[in-house]
Image (tube, coloured by chain):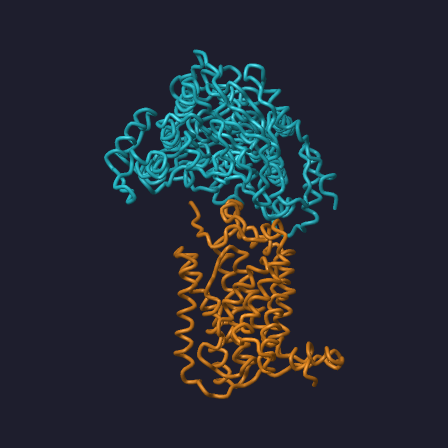
Amino acid sequence: MSVAGASAGSPLLAVRNLTKLFGTFAACNGIDLDIRPGEIHALLGENGAGKSTLVKMLFGVLAPTAGEILWLGAPVSIASPGAARRLGIGMVFQHFSLFEALTVAENIALSLPPGISLARVAEEAARLSHAYGLPLDPKAHVADLSVGERQRIEIVRALLQDPQLIILDEPTSVLTPQEADRLFETLAKLKGEGRSVLYISHRLEEVQRICDRATVLRHGKVTGACDPRQETPASLARMMVGSDVAAVSAEGTNTKGEVLLEARDLDVAARTPFAVSLKNVSLKVHGGEVLAIAGVAGNGQGELFDALSGEYPVSKGEAVLIRSRPVGSLGITARRLMGAGFVPEERHGHAAVPAMSLSDNLVLARSQSDRRAFLGGGVLGIIKSAAVHMAAKRISAAMDVRKSGEDPPAGSLSGGNLQKFIVGRELDRQPAVLIVNQPTWGVDAGAASRIRQALVDLARSGSAVLVISQDLDEIFEVATEIAVISEGRLSDAYPARALTREKIGLLMGGMHGERVPEAAHAH
Amino acid sequence: MGIVEAILLTVITAATPLVLAALGELVTERAGVLNLGVEGMMIMGAVLAFAATHATGSPYLGILAGIGGGALFSLLFGFLTLTLVANQVATGLALTILGLGISGQIGEAYVGMSGTKLPQIAIPLLSDIPFVGPLLFRQDLIFYLSIALVIGVNWFLFKSRTGLKIRAIGDNHASAHALGIGVIRIRYLAVMFGGACAGLAGAQLSLVYTPQWVENMSAGRGWIALALVVFASWRPWRVLAGGYLFGAVSISQLHAQALGLGIPSQFLSALPYAATVVVLVLISHNRRTTLINTPASLGKPFVPDR
């Protein structure tokens, strides 16, 4: 596909009044957008602003309800991803559309036109990956690769089609700062070749650094089109959120108490072939401290949370201590009874049962730790609905949970509001130790700031808080101490003030280094 | 013909329907569909093969009827689970019960009739090899087909593009859909292949194993085939090995019972199941390869969000 038909300045792709309705809900509402040849165009917006819906329509995964898409000035109907590829549009998904059980070459071959042998795909993939600085081993199984390597497959897969427009959906959310830098070099190379990039993100610094123009979405509508370099992060954030976001206040002093949570040489073998094993993890959290554990996804965060919370107890009791008592071999309820609280990463199906009401979810989590308050009738354990409803109401008010109705099913709440309820459910007990995995993943800025403030306040009241997060902004907002997890090993903890992003990035990647495919998989 | 040859021949006859039915189910499951109706499709194949042979006098038309009957019957499962998105487990169980019932109804007229045995085809030269020749190269068409299908399915799944698509759908149907692969269409074809293979396995029962119609003559073989697929970690050669192992142990235990060794017969009857499970578990000890071969979206319903 050639861009010769497009004169300089006229758009490669134009979107006019594009609308997508899900029932009566408008995920995208009258969107206008122009992408010029050879530019990196940012699509900015909060979670739920309609960015993903918009690009799914551009890539033929969703069908628009109304409006039109123009490619090189001519109206087109993009009925399928195949049609999008034939036009010259390539896409790198946020949640990778890769097949874990297949090899790199097989994954790539699936998106190519038929009639190309696997051997040729492997050769071509190896050539392209080197040309753009994205080393890959075609014979490796995807299940064995890091998230950064998986993203390279997606990019190489898109590049093999020789696209004029490449859409990247939140590409850096899973990368170390160093990996992100390499991605930006690749994008600059693509731009130099005259290709256009549609770059979806909610990270303002990145957008200001690499993008030529930006379109901002909020609630499915375009709220701004600008040159991001002319804007300040604050003005961009205003366009995204619609109001100023409250900054987390870290004022006041934390008094450092005694050690409330401790891990000593915690070793956990990998439960599945794709899981990470924890090696010699030691940590201490004093009362009044927030220890944040940074790290790229899939480096043992889930396993660490499971071991500390007791979801999967370990055999050595002394490996985990809560308030100086060994709890390693005890389950979640026993640890809760000692004054600990836990918030797992997955909201739906893990922290909450989506089909059940908020009050039922409250009873499920706290029926043992708050037995006297919530259950009556002795051994019968009859639920005291009035007490439970009151507690649910108290939590909703304390955390500003916005919901439809008095006691709706958990699944009907938006991600941010449900997360506020789940965090509030633990905070309501005033736990001495709180362990949170990914507290604000996929949560809008307002709710995120509310949750972070609550974590900081809890620590200030004397509790020990452990936060596992991949979001460096979040970590710097809440943490008093920071440690980095990488391939199941935990670094020493450093005072947050003594660390910079670069230092954390080095700890994330530097401990295990870049994998060299040729050496790692000698066939 | 010596006693060893005679025993080995019966082993082959006992193993062939298991291998065929399991191979079909393997392809279905590789595409992410769990069809528990193997037993029902098998018995439908058996009764239709017998009826068609009886009506036309040609066991080859009987084979076609068995294959076609199994495939058509699986189409019912496909329509319910893929188009109407019914629960796969419940629908599969219903298919088995339905198949056993309908086949009994159709077969009522044929009970006690003598059937036509599928003729053996001697392959020139090869069939003259001592010992091996009569065993492997003087066999019926269905045996040859079963071996060809194992080789063919193994090649098809791991070397062909359509096979790659099937594995991709079985691993992650949402991603496959996003890539523009026709998930539902390929699943229909995989389900029908499974039905055709089960029907062929049924035809073997009523045309080769015992050339007559007996109600419930599949006698649980469909369930064994289902178990073989899992224990073989969804790999065709292991299905072949597992099928023959099961056949060998079940024939040997019959002979052992006949010899009267004083071992309780219940224990001997259980032996084939135990032996197959133990051996296949042992060869599947590598959990990583097992996981890589397990279709991750097995049994999960797929509704495209369009």
Which of B239/A370 is in front?
Answer: A370
Residue A2 visible to an observer of this rendering:
no
Residue at 53%, 77% in the rendered image: B205
- Indicate left or right for A354 with A82 as reference: left
Which of B13/A120 is in front?
Answer: B13
Quadrant placement of the N terminus of chain A: top right
Residue B157 visible to an observer of this rendering:
yes
Which of B240/B269 is in front?
Answer: B269
- Indicate left or right for A121 with B210 as reference: right
In the rendered image, residue A385, in percent from the top left (x then y), is placed at: 25, 37
- Residue B11: image quadrant is bottom right
Residue at 47%, 44% in the rendered image: A79
Q: Is residue A443 above or below residue A1?
A: above
Q: Which chain is cyan?
A: A
Q: Which chain is orange?
A: B
Q: Is residue B276 above or below residue A441?
A: below
Residue farthest to the top, as pictured = A252
